[in-house]
Amino acid sequence: MDFVSGLPRTRKGHDSVWVVMDRLTKLAHFIPVNTTYKTHKYAELFMEQIVKLHGVPLSIVSDRDPRFTSRFWRPFQEAMGTRLKKSTSHHPQTDGQSERTIQTLEDMLRTCVLEDG
């Protein structure tokens, strides 16, 4: 899990994209979010967008973003039986598939912005 942030605000107020990758199927979920969301909002979106479709994951790899190291998120995942794994700082190869997917998403968004111009 990671974020693409610093995007222009949409009409619905979103300014970031939460990228959630299924490492087995390589399926990527791009969830529009706002940087002001609190951790419980991410938990709600996680249940609606990920668990509803795929079930509870056995493990999650994420960076050390405070949203995923919070006092809420860790107990939330532990209660579901999900192990949280953190990618190593400054070593994006730990979660290389996500990083490549994020780069592709950024390229596509940049192209859309340039075309609409």
Image: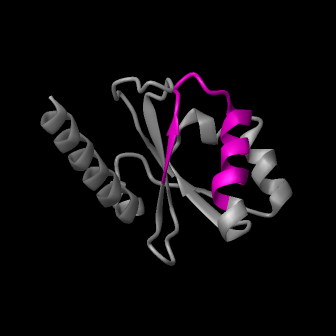
Instruction: Where is residue 69? Give x, y as percent.
Output: 64, 40
Give the residue at x 50% y 39%: 32
Give the residue at x 27% y 51%: 103
Q: Is residue 39 magenta?
A: yes
Chain part drawn in magenta: 30-50
- In the rendered structure, the answer to whether residue 5 lies left or right of residue 42 reads left
Look at the image and tell me whether residue 58 can be seen: no
The residue furthest bottom is: 24
The colour scheme used to paint the residues is one colour
- In the rendered structure, the answer to whether residue 29 lies left or right of residue 8 reads right
Q: Is residue 20 magenta?
A: no
Instruction: Where is residue 76? Give x, y as percent.
Output: 80, 47
Q: Is residue 51 above or below residue 113?
A: below
Instruction: Where is residue 68? Give x, y as percent.
Output: 62, 42
Give the residue at x 66% y 66%: 53
Look at the image and tell me whether residue 54 can be seen: yes
